[in-house]
Structure formats: C-alpha cells, structure tokens
Amino acid sequence: MNKKLLLGLGVATALVAGVSYLVTKPYFAEQARIELLADQLEYRNKTRYAGGVRWHYLYDFDIPDNPTVADWNTEQLTLPQILFTITNPEDETKVSYWALSIDGTNPQLLIPDGVLPPPPRRGNIDFSKYMSRSPNGRYLVIPQKGGSVLYDLANGEITKLGKVGRDIHHSMWDIDSTQVVVKKGEELLLVKLATKAVLKFNEVNGPLARRAALFGSAYMSQSEQMIYLSFDRDMAGGNFYCGESEDYIATFGDHGVPNCGNTLVIDAKTLQLVDRGDFSPNAYYCHLRGSKFSDGFYCSGAGEGKVFRVGRPSQQVGQHPANATLLALNGGDIWLTELRQRRISRVLAQPSENSPTKEMVYFHRALHDGEQAEMSAFGFGFSRYVIEHKDSDSWSESLYPLPTYDDLEKAKLVLQERNHGDR
C-alpha cells in the first residue's frame, strides 16, 4: 500500500476520532457533572443539608507564567469582580493584585508582584476583603498598614487615605468614577479622583462628627449617593441621640433637618447632614453590616440574618441566618459573602419549579502550574455596566446552574451503583 493511501487512512482515522471526541465530549462532561453532584449528595445525606437544599460549585482558574498587567478599563464588564492577592511562593512578603469575574473567567493582573505590600492581617481577619474597585476599573481602595490607600492603575500613583487601615471598610463610588467615599473606624472620607483631594467628615462638620463616624454603623445607597450612619442610643449618648446640645448644633447646624432618630443621612457629595430619623432597626436587635454594593444591609446577632433594602425607613426583603455580610440584592435573590470573604452565596427566596435548591455557594481557586496558589480574602468591584443594569440583569444566569430534580435522581442512581458495586 503506497504512502499516500496510508497517510489518507491515517488522516481519515484521525478525523473520525476527532469527530467522535466532539460528539462524546458533552456526554463525558455531563457524566462528570452528575458524579460531582453524587459526591456532594453523599456528603449532604449525613448533614442538615440533605435533599439538595444547598450546593457548592468550585471555579478553578489559572494564574499564567509571566502575566502582563491588564487594561484597567472595565466599565462595560457585565459581571461583578472579586479582588484578591496572590502570594509569591518564593517570597511570602510579596503579593500581586488580581481581579476575576464571579463566573471564574477573565483573570486580570492589576498590580504586579512586589509593587505594593499585602493588606494587613489581625488574627484571622484578612483585610484584603475590604478592597474595592471603581466602576471604570481605574482605581482601587486597598487597606495597608498605617492607613488605606487609593491606587491609580493608570499611572501607579498612590494616595494615602487617612490613618486607619485595620478596621471595617465601606467604600462607595460614584457611577461615573469621579469620587469615592470611604468609611473606616472614626474616619469618613470623600476623595475627588481627578485631583486626589481628600475631604474629611470631621473637617466639613464640627466637634461631634468624629464621634458620629466612630459609633455609627455605616451602610450606603449607591442610587442616592447617600451615607447612612446608624447608632445605638446608649453608646452614642442621649444628647447625641436627640441633637439639642450646643456641640450637636455646632457640628451639624440648625437648618431644618430633624434632630432625632437612630440614623443620620449624609450627602456623599458634600459630607453634610441632609436627613435624620429612625430609618434602621433598633441596634439592640440588629448588628448591622452594610452591603458591598451599597443597596442594603444585613442584621447579624439578634437580628437573625434579616436582610434590608436601603430606604427611609429601610425595608426587610428576606432572612438567612449565617455568619455573613450582604454582597448585593440582584435578580430577586440575596447574595451574601461569608465574613472571611472567600466564597459567594446566592440565596433564593424560594426554590424554583425545577430545583429544590435554596442556596448555591460558589468558590474560586487559583492554580499555578497545576498547584493551588495562595489567595487572599475577596474584595469586590462593580463596573458601570453592572451598576446601571443591576435591576434588569440577573447574575445567576452566568453562573453554574442549580441542580434540577432530574439531576438529583441521576446522582442518586450513581450513589446506588457505588454502594452496591457489582450486585
């Protein structure tokens, strides 16, 4: 047989094999998916999450060798991003800063290895979880020892933001990326991004402003560009609760704004008081944690996981007891992130027609040369597109789907085959 015929047969065989692979690839992918469900079902049969009420899904993604810094312009990115650091395995004092879409795609190197120190830690608290990114993608708020910083990805410029670095951070960006408000400890700062000018709450107002920021539990409204400071009457002091003292008037003025109520409403454009009232749950019943998106808050402790949408007054929209922080309200679902901020949970108000699942938990794991890389806790970034389309887009449509009742039946059959072997 001549070589051309042999070559032709070889090519034909390869083509058939290739077509066969393409035809059977979906089958093997489906089998792997059902095997994964069976693994989780076997574990859940021994826990309080039996019956498919809660599921996990892990997104693996690769950290390339010799990565290049990504284009910072992410205004039209259609999904939120997680922000994190990757530790240099050869020098643990050095980290690189990264972003990743929540569906596990589009990893972006933001700051190369060793340019900026890692965010601080305190015990088990990794302050990386307070990183935040502007809607246009250009700016980052990053906690650092001795005070947080604003990092400009366009030119590497670093602007110090006060002295507090190891405290709870709340960041809210203007949708056009012209300013950011950062609340941390006793500091409430307004940063004009074009000039990097920093305006301080206690400088705009008077002697009680620092105290209000210190004792106030912050949550913010992206749509209103308002800052809400909720406080406990006893902690803040009776005179502060109803502002009749000279210090209160010297701080916030006397220009028709109500002076009683457990919540101060501050204009994010000016840092001035514009309203006051009982807009938040009583602090005794709600250990308040503001959302990452600035659209609501979560009540831990005696609040038993109640979730509220920002308003005057705020409105309860759901409840999910967990040691968590509210990420956002989207698509009729509650999105949470655990306090360590290394995973994202989608909590459904009720199961759908096709699935018994009420909570879907998404993990993200970085791999380098096939080995797991050391990732920090997650901060978050919301593009202009995400902000503008939050009420019409559902993030869950881009994520791994809920297992259906049919999927669970298939997984149960797999478990039976495992348990009975050849019988």
Image: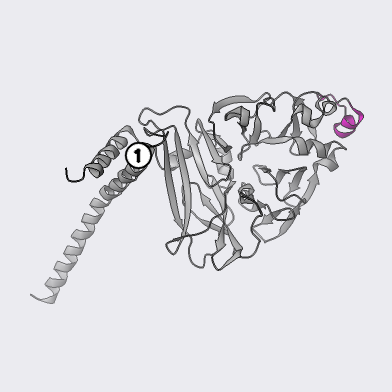
- Let me know if residue 254 is in the magenta part: yes
Q: Residue at x 56, y 26 (%)?
A: 317
Quadrant of res 212: top right
Q: Residue at x 78, y 49 (%)?
A: 198
- Let me know if residue 58 is in the magenta part: no
Q: In the image, is residue 200 above or below residue 374?
A: above
For disc 1, the marked residue is: 41
Say left or right for 27 vs 305. Answer: left
Q: In the image, is residue 3 above or below residue 356?
A: below
Secondary structure of the residue carrying tag 1 is helix
From this viewpoint, is residue 226 visible?
no
Q: Residue at x 82, y 37 (%)?
A: 209
Q: In the image, is residue 194 above or below residue 302?
A: below
- Percent across and percent down for residue 395 are 48, 39
> What residue span does the magenta drawing correspond to?
245-259
- Percent across and percent down for residue 318 are 54, 27
Say left or right for 233 vs 2. Answer: right
Using the image as rendered, state which of residue 112 and residue 155 is in the foreground.
112
Q: Residues within 10 Å of mark 1 (few under 14, many from 20)?
A: many
- Percent across and percent down for residue 267 are 75, 35
Q: Residue at x 35, y 39 (%)?
A: 41
Quarter occupied by the C terminus: top left
The residue type indicated by label 1 comes to: Leu
From this viewpoint, is residue 250 visible?
yes
